[in-house]
Image (cartoon, rainbow, N blue to C red):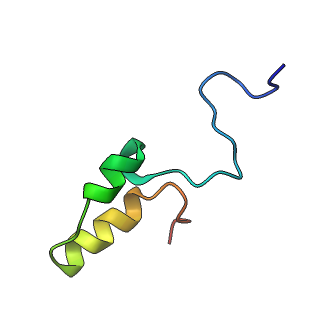
Amino acid sequence: MDARPHGEDDPDQDNPIGGDEITEQQLEADNPAEEETLETLDPDSPPA
């Protein structure tokens, strides 16, 4: 039986930006400000 609470992913697994792999692949920054925004949305990137 899984000991993690419902809805909690494996902490060793990389989490895609935007919720799933396809969305992550579609997200592209057009300028430095958008790149910074995408970095803040990345669940695997520690906050500054």
Query: Going by the picture, which residue comes out furthest to the bottom?
Result: 32
Which residue is located at x 55 percent, y 59 percent? 44
Question: Is 6 placed left or right of 35 in the picture?
Answer: right
Which residue is located at x 63 percent, y 37 percent? 9
Tag count: 0
Which residue is located at x 31 percent, y 72 percent? 36
Residue 8 position within the rendered picture, expressed as x and y whole percent measured from the top left: 63, 32
Residue 34 position within the rendered picture, expressed as x and y whole percent measured from the top left: 22, 69
Residue 10 position within the rendered picture, expressed as x and y whole percent measured from the top left: 69, 42
Which residue is located at x 32 percent, y 63 percent? 38
Residue 35 position within the rendered picture, expressed as x and y whole percent measured from the top left: 28, 73
- The residue lying toward the viewer, choosing from 17 and 21, is 21
Instruction: Determine which quarter of the picture holds residue 25.
Output: bottom left
Quadrant, the N terminus: top right
Query: Going by the picture, which residue comes out furthest to the left?
Result: 30
Location of residue 28 with respect to 16 vertically, above or below: below
Location of residue 36 with respect to 40 vertically, above or below: below
Question: Is 31 placed left or right of 48 in the picture?
Answer: left
